[in-house]
Image (spheres, rainbow, N blue to C red):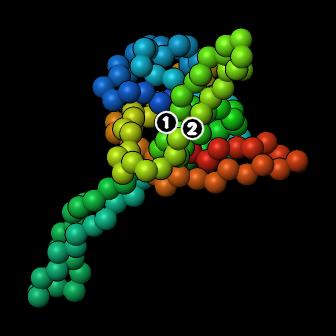
Amino acid sequence: MPQTASDIIVTGARVFIGTVGSLLPAPALAVDAAWPTGWRDVGFTLEPTKLMYKFDLLEIFVEQTMGAVRRRRVKEEASVETVMAEHTAGNLALAMAATATTTAATTLVPGYEEVTIGGDPNLPLYMVGVEGGYNDEDEAFFPIRLFLWLANSADGGTLEYARDKPAGITLKL
């Protein structure tokens, strides 16, 4: 393989959540441009965005050999993980498989947001998009986009308040 320095990627990443069936951004859409309707950017993140993929194998052994004669993927899992920096009801609801509601201010009551967590076995489904960018060997700037077609919150999370660091919201989809 050739050694191509432009194939060494260093990029921050934006995480988008979409409704299932949302149109994907066009391949020609510039990095950091607005994504189609149905997608929302989860905002700033405190940690790198990680995409994990793993699968289980079925290994077929026969009596005539010591090793497997065939292998087949029988289960696969993919996930996206980061820590959201923006402490909003929507982000907390996304991470905890909860619902967020907003109450508008009146003359007697200030506006507020409320997050309801738990009590429902059904998990909301989303599409997930991750976008970064890189310069190729001609210094043209291109997007890197990864998608999960169906995702839901993986296992809740921990919310930590401290005087010496931001209260990040762990996101595992």
Q: Residue at x 71, y 16 (%)?
A: 108
Find disc 1 in the rendering and name its residue.
99
Image side of residue 37 versus residue 149, left or right: right
Q: What residue type is labelled 2?
A: Val
Q: Which residue is drawn at 12% across and 82% down?
A: 62
Q: How crowded is mark 2: few (under 14 residues within 10 Å), some or many (20 or more)?
A: some
Q: Are marks 1 and 2 in contact (CB under 8 Å)?
A: yes
Find disc 2 in the rendering and name its residue.
115
Please say if 158 is above or below 138.
below
- Of callouts 1 and 2, the N-terminal one: 1
Please say if 152 is above or below 91.
below
The spot of residue 79 in percent (x, y) is 45, 48
Residue 81 in view (yes/no): yes
The spot of residue 116 in percent (x, y) is 53, 41
Image side of residue 85 versus residue 166, left or right: left
Q: Nearer the viewer, residue 160 or 61?
A: 160
